């Protein structure tokens, strides 16, 4: 993969984005030659995670968090990824959107949500409930890469990270395994001839890159606002097809590469004190060695 | 049943004993609700809408203005109210019939999986001789009668029998609006529709490009008759499919 800076002045869209927020760079990422069809098959990863609103509790054995009886839902960044894929379909850039989830039996509910949002079909790679927390980004990336091969996909859209383990690695690893270009932290995706122009959220501004297809894109928070799955969409989604398989069926070994030694709550903040006046405050600060 | 007869008089529907008997049998199995209660519930949970591809027809539908629109399925008083939405495939078939009335004029028509009944009602208003409305959902039959009443159209014939696979069809035209959403069921339906086509019926299939049809081998034997862009509100209930198509066997 080569990064080649391009001449910025040639790109009116560059200037437009520049006006919004900070520094803008323009790069072109080359990938292997590939003739692109007009409409893409898009694979989207959807992970079942503990709902963002739930207060996380550490398990008594200090090796994980409590998941039993806790509300789960789709990882919010994956919702953004599905929404973007469905929008690509509605713009007729994509021809088919396939939602993929690696997880326990209940991961099917997450896939159903994706189907209700507009995905055409689902693939459930079943991971036994006990092994779910030991599933690593590399395993998921290998599964995704295999499915890309099987499904002859042209584009993979993933959430930039899952809110449970915050790894932020699956998209990058998937791209590496496939030897495809990657456009991570996308806040805007536009299709040009056989390429995607992706605006990325980087430190201090936005970066616009062009990636040749096929490619892997990871969705950042500002890419879109996901739609709500309404009753009619949920009803039709109940009938959409979900293929079931195991990681072993894809030849992927999911034995863990690392071991969790300890999971701890964040340190509890000590309570403050109230002081009568400024003099007391100064004295207290002097005593504490702060001033 | 008294209220039912009243509505029937309003609709101008002649008594049809076969259908009546069938509906009673089905009711014992799937529902204990009386038709008048069902009708009240339908009226309470839907609004009359013309915001679709066939504004000529007013239909009782669950729209974004109804509370059920955003409700989870278990809060719906009706199990799977497929009849409460005007599916894109149904809209396409109805639009096609209204624009090309010659297709059904003077002919016998079967509206298979009729749901709200829009396509059959379109056929009736385009001059079809006799339309048989068919849906396995008993509630759909009540909704259909309400919709017929709003549009002052006479319902001649209805049945809740599952017709898939039944040999031969006395109908000259068979309408199948948006039924191909489940891969397994789609396979059975397409094979049956092909048989009907071979025995001389004109089959009109409406579909927005759902996977079950797109991936089916019989798709290759279909010919596209029309393509429609869907209304913005239809898109809300049909994520991912901005168009709908009418297909027939070539």
Image (cartoon, coloured by chain):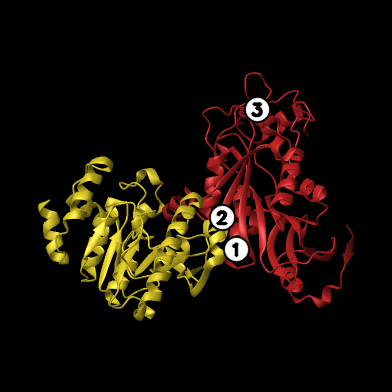
Residue A170 placement (x, y as % from top left):
74, 44
Looking at the rendered image, the quarter that the C terminus of chain A falls into is: top right
Label count reads 3
Give a yes or no on whether discs 2 and 3 share a subunit: yes
Residue A259 is marked as none
First in residue order: circle 1 vs circle 2: 1
Q: Label 1 marks which chain's residue?
A: A
Residue occupied by mark 2: A120
Place of residue B129 in the rendered image (x, y in percent of width and height, measured from the top left) = 25, 73
Cα distance, mark 2 to mark 3? 46 Å
Give how far across and how far down residue A123 sits, in percent. Answer: 61, 45
* Disc 1/disc 2 C-alpha distance (Å): 10 Å
Chain A visual colour: red
SS for callout 1:
helix
Name the residue carrying label 3: A268
Chain letter of the residue carrying label 3: A
- Distance from label 3 to label 1 (Cα)? 47 Å
On the same chain, marks 3 and 1? The answer is yes
Q: Colour of chain B?
A: yellow
Label 3: how many Cα within 10 Å (few below 14, some 14–19, many 20+): few
Judging depth in this view, the residue of A117 and B146 nearest the camera is: B146
**Which mark sits nearer the N-terminus, 2 or 3?**
2
Determine contact: label 1, label 2, CB under 8 Å: yes
In this picture, residue B109 sits left or right of residue B190: left
| Residue mark closest to the camera, 2 vs 3 | 2
* Residue tagged 1: A89
Mark nearer the viewer, 3 or 1: 1
Snapshot quadrant of residue B151: bottom left
Is the residue marked by circle 2 packed among few (<14), some (14-19), or many (20+) residues within 10 Å? Answer: many
């Amino acid at each position: 993969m080569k990064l080649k800076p391009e001449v910025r002045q040639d790109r009116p869209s560059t200037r437009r984005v520049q006006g919004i927020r900070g520094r803008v760079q323009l790069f072109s990422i080359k990938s292997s030659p590939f003739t692109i069809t007009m409409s893409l098959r898009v694979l989207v990863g959807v992970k079942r995670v503990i709902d963002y609103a739930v207060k996380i509790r550490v398990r008594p054995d200090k090796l994980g968090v409590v998941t039993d009886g806790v509300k789960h839902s789709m990882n919010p960044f994956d919702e953004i990824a599905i929404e973007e894929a469905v929008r690509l379909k509605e713009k007729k850039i994509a021809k088919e959107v396939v939602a993929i989830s690696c997880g326990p039996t209940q991961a099917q509910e997450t896939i159903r949500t994706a189907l209700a949002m507009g995905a055409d079909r689902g693939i459930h790679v079943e991971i036994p409930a006990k092994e779910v927390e030991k599933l690593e980004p590399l395993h998921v990336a290998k599964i995704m890469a295999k499915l890309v091969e099987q499904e002859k996909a042209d584009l993979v859209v993933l959430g930039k990270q899952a809110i449970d383990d915050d790894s932020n690695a699956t998209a990058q690893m998937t791209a590496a395994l496939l030897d495809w270009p990657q456009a991570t932290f996308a806040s805007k995706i536009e299709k040009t001839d056989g390429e995607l122009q992706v605006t990325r959220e980087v430190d201090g501004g936005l970066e616009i890159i062009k990636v040749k297809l096929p490619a892997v894109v990871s969705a950042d928070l500002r890419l879109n606002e996901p739609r709500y799955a309404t009753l009619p969409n949920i009803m039709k989604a109940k009938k959409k097809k979900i293929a079931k398989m195991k990681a072993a069926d894809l030849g992927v070994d999911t034995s863990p590469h690392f071991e969790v030694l300890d999971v701890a709550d964040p340190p509890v903040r000590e309570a403050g004190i109230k002081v009568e006046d400024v003099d007391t405050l100064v004295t207290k600060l002097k005593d504490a060695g702060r001033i | 049943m008294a209220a039912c007869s009243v509505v029937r008089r309003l609709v101008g529907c002649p008594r049809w004993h076969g259908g009546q008997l069938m509906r009673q049998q089905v009711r014992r199995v799937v529902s204990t609700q009386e038709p008048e209660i069902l009708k009240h519930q339908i009226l309470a949970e839907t609004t009359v809408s013309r915001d679709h591809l066939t504004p000529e027809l007013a239909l009782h539908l669950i729209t974004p203005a109804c509370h059920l629109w955003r409700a989870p399925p278990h809060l719906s008083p009706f199990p799977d109210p497929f009849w409460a939405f005007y599916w894109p495939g149904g809209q396409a078939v109805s639009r096609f019939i209204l624009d090309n009335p010659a297709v059904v004029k003077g002919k016998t028509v079967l509206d298979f999986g009729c749901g709200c009944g829009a396509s059959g009602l379109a056929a009736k208003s385009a001059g079809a001789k006799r339309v048989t409305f068919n849906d396995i959902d008993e509630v759909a039959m009540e909704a259909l009668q309400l919709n017929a009443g709003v549009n002052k159209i006479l319902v001649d014939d209805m049945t809740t029998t599952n017709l898939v696979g039944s040999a031969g069809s006395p109908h000259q035209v068979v309408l199948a609006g948006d039924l191909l959403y489940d891969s397994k069921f789609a396979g059975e339906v397409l094979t049956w529709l092909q048989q009907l086509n071979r025995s001389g019926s004109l089959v009109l299939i409406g579909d927005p490009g759902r996977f079950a049809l797109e991936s089916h081998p019989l798709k290759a034997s279909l010919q596209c008759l029309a393509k429609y862009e869907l209304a913005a509100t239809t898109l809300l209930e049909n994520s991912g499919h901005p168009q709908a198509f009418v297909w027939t066997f070539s």
